Image: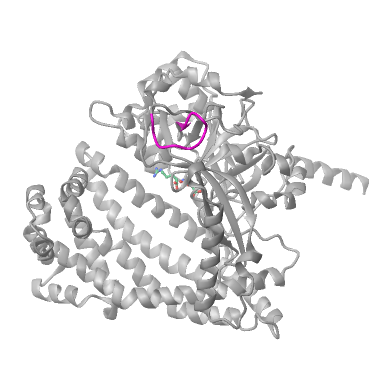
Amino acid sequence: MKRLIALAVMVAAILPARADEGMWLPALISQRIADMQAKGLQLTAEDLYSVNHASLKDAIVLFGGGCTGEVVSDQGLLLTNHHCGYSYIQRHSSVEHDYLKDGFWAMNQAQELPNPGLTVRFLERMDNVTEAVLEGITDALSEEEKASLISQRCDAIRQQAEDPAQGLVAQVSALYYGNQYFLYVFRQFRDVRLVGAPPSSIGKFGGETDNWMWPRHTGDFSIFRIYAAPDGTPADYSPENVPYRPKKSFEISRAGVQEGDFTFVYGCPGSTREYIHSAEVDYVATVSDPERIALRDQRLGIMKKYMTGNQAVRIQYSSKYASVANAWKKWQGEAKGIVKMQTVARKQAYEARFAEWAQGTRYEGLTERLATLYAAWVPYQRTYEYFLETVNSVELPAFAGRLSRNLDKREAVAEAFFKDYYQPIDEEIFEAMLTAFFDEVPDTFQPAFFKEQLVQHGSVHAWREWLYANSCLTDPARVAALESLEQLQQDPAYQFYDAYIQCFSRDIYPVLSSLDDEIEGLYHDYMQGQMDFEPDKAFYPDANLTLRIAYGHVEGYRPCDAVYYQPVSTLRGIMEKDNPDIFDYNIPQVLRDLYAQGGYEDQPVCFLATNHTTGGNSGSPVLNARGQLIGINFDRVWEGTMSDIVFDPEVCRNISLDIRYLLFVVEKVGGAGYLLDEMHFTN
Ligand code: ARG
Ligand code: GLU
């Protein structure tokens, strides 16, 4: 018996603790801190989040509209992903200075490049304002009255907290489907300059081929610097501005990671739906994901056909291809993961237990009502997604729509459009997507104009040929010569655009949005019901792009039978993939030369961990037990992407850049080692 116990203790010590699901609120982290400490954290709740003194939260920003960044020096030096900085790097690029291709390294602060429009915001504090928002809101009020009162209160609370002169902006966010409200106060900076970016052959190494995959070797980072007015307040760009002195910056650990090490990710996850009804999960896994994947298969195939072997077209479409492919690949993992996890059946079983418990309570009949609403919702949602993925993905009509809204800026709109437009791709996508549209969208939702055109031209193919031959929008000179909105409205591409927009706004949107509202309304109760049903369970709110903490440990996984993926990748793997003939794997010569010198084989590049993350966590600091920076989050493995709906500890892994690879690239590839002088290292 004694031996058995000893064995159990030993096994427990060897096996890392199970992966931890959850994205927790920093202000309430004291509720999780004991668990985090038991798993290895060596910090206190106050070290992570405090309003009274500097804490780790003060070194983290929401970067732009949808990524995270972290400060690593007391001169406002900021790290995020290459794919988060991509559009800014692109804007500074030209044929003479192709920073996307060659990378960019400022060699001193004077060379750093301003980025108008880019902001970063630090969280000053977050307060639970639920009582103030919901006071006096009772079921005696109608849904509209409730909604309008809640939105007035949120506005008032927000306005009171804002102070534009200090750069203080605020938002009130609903958590748990409006069962709680939090006020978030941020300090937002508006002068953020580009400091460095590796060439895309490092920052985007592996491209779409490796995206969402392991083994991964992407050096997905870029470096910025936050500037403020000389008195430290946020200001618009000015040469007089000075590097911002943050309240806190991260120390960097060069000690490296080992399987089993505690890690946590502190960032801004965008959106998850963990508490939804089985009907929605079923829709996602069996209808939405598979149908959208199939439609995108066609679009990607068409783009790829023209991109292969045509350098100019490849450049024009690489960013478009990347964004279509990104969700396409994620959905494949998501649908597969939901099926494998049997999430629909499990949720149904849960709903049956919930319904039984709910009898006689105010939650009685809730899950059934949700099921009924979903039955009505599915055809509208499906049609909406079809509109998005088919007719709305054809470029020429969408261009017509943009022109109609910006006719006075037609030259700029046209210039941006034609720079990255290749008509044969668009024509072929038109034909494929319209064919799918007629096949799959219920007759009652098809615009009458489309049906007439089809009859008139006899086939989608003939309609396509006629439309592209007769639209003046394929020709920059004729676009520039457009005289009036009336003239634009006569154009066949505009008429196509107008037909589906009218049909959508008249026949689909009103019903869909009212069903959405009703469903969200029921979730308000269902969420509270789930919490009452399982009072001992720790519920974390769905992600909403506000700051969260996820924690877990470094761990590989088994993608399939007989295969175990180690959690750390190295430069050796880059050399294994290196191939000058494959665009995604063609590394810069300097990396080959460095490798040939010897001694860099084991240079770590990326690592896997069990932290629960999602889109928006890109760029998030990945921290060790002492809160030191060990990596930058940039992706998940595709087998685990269902974690937005259901988390599987077996395969859900976040992918991080090892911070030591960033240091290596900055120093050895970029020759910008001077940047390391302002960072603080520990071992
Ligand atoms: N999958 C990552 C994310 O969702 C990276 C996307 C950018 N990279 C790419 N190859 N498309 O944002
Ligand atoms: N690449 C994603 C982002 O931009 C992170 C990947 C994910 O976890 O969804 O936020």
Q: Is residue 374 above or below residue 22?
A: below
Tell whether 100 sits left or right of 365. Answer: left
**Boundaries of the magenta span:** 224-238
Q: Residue 356 or 517: which is nearer the viewer?
A: 517
Direction right: furthest residue = 2
Q: Residue 18 or 681: which is nearer the viewer?
A: 681
Residue depicted at x 43% and y 35%: 192
Direction bottom: furthest residue = 360
* Secondary structure mainly formed by the magenta segment: loop
Q: Residue 61 lies in magenta, yes or no?
A: no
Residue depicted at x 24% and y 42%: 316
x, y percentage for residue 416? 22, 45
Residue depicted at x 40% and y 28%: 198
On-image quarter of the C terminus: top right
x, y percentage for residue 228? 47, 33
- Residue 55 shows up from this direction: yes
